[in-house]
Amino acid sequence: MRQGWSIYFTFMFAGLNTLVTTYYLAIEKMPLLKNFFPSFALYVVIVAGIAIPLLVIVGYIHMKRSVAYKAEADIYTESNPHTKRMLINTDMILNLQIELSKILVKISKNEKLTDEEIEKINLLQKQLSDHFSKKAF
C-alpha cells in the first residue's frame, strides 16, 4: 500500500503526542497522579503495557468480529475497478485450469476428447479472447 508508511508513521507520532501531552499537562500538575507515575518513562511503560494489548484486541474485533471491516472491504471492491477485473480474471483462469486438468487426465489415459469437450474448450478460448480484447473495468 502506498499510504501504509504514512499511516503508521502518523499513528506513532499521535501516540507519542498523546503520551507527552497527558503526562506534562495532566499528571505532572496533579500530585496524586504524580505519586503513581513519578517519571515519564514509567508512565510510557505502563500506558504502553495497557494500550498495546487493548489496541490489538480492538483491532482483532474490528477485523474478525464486526461487520465494519466487511463493509470497508465491500466499498473498496466496488470503488476500485482493478479489483473487480482481477476477480473476473481469476474466475476465468480457474475455469480454464479445471478444463485443462480434465483434458490432461484424459490424454494421460489415452482417451479421445469428445466433440462436446472440444466445443467447451473453444467456447472458453473465445470467452478469454473477448475478455482480453475488451480490457474493460
Image: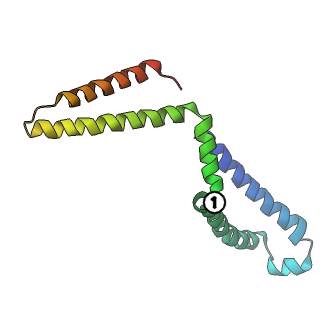
Question: Which residue is nearer to you in this view: 56 or 21?
Answer: 56
- Residue that sits furthest to the front in the current view: 116
Q: Looking at the figure, which quarter contains the C terminus?
A: top right
Is residue 37 toward the left or the right of residue 70 in the image? right
Q: Tell me where residue 101 sits by quadrant.
A: top left
Residue 135 image position (x, y, % from top left): 47, 22
Residue 69 image position (x, y, % from top left): 62, 53
Q: Residue at label 1?
A: 66
For residue 7, above or below residue 43: above
Q: Which residue is drawn at 67% across and 72% down?
A: 49
Identify the secondary structure beneath mark 1: loop
Question: Which residue is nearer to you in this view: 59 or 37?
Answer: 59
- Badge 1 local density, few (<14 within 10 Å), some, or many (20+)? few
For residue 59, above or below residue 45: above
Q: Tell me where residue 103 sits by quadrant.
A: top left
Q: Which residue is drawn at 83% across and 67% down?
A: 23
Q: Which residue is drawn at 89% across and 65% down?
A: 25
For residue 81, above or below residue 17: above
Q: Which residue is drawn at 59% across and 57% down?
A: 63
Residue 60 image position (x, y, % from top left): 60, 62
Is residue 58 toward the left or the right of residue 108 in the image? right
Q: Looking at the figure, which quarter contains the N terminus?
A: top right
Question: Which residue is nearer to you in this view: 124 or 45?
Answer: 124
Residue 16 image position (x, y, % from top left): 75, 58
Numbered label tally: 1
For residue 79, above or below residue 71: above
Please say which color scheme the image uses.
rainbow
Q: Tell me where residue 39 sits by quadrant.
A: bottom right
Give the residue type at disc 1. Answer: Ser
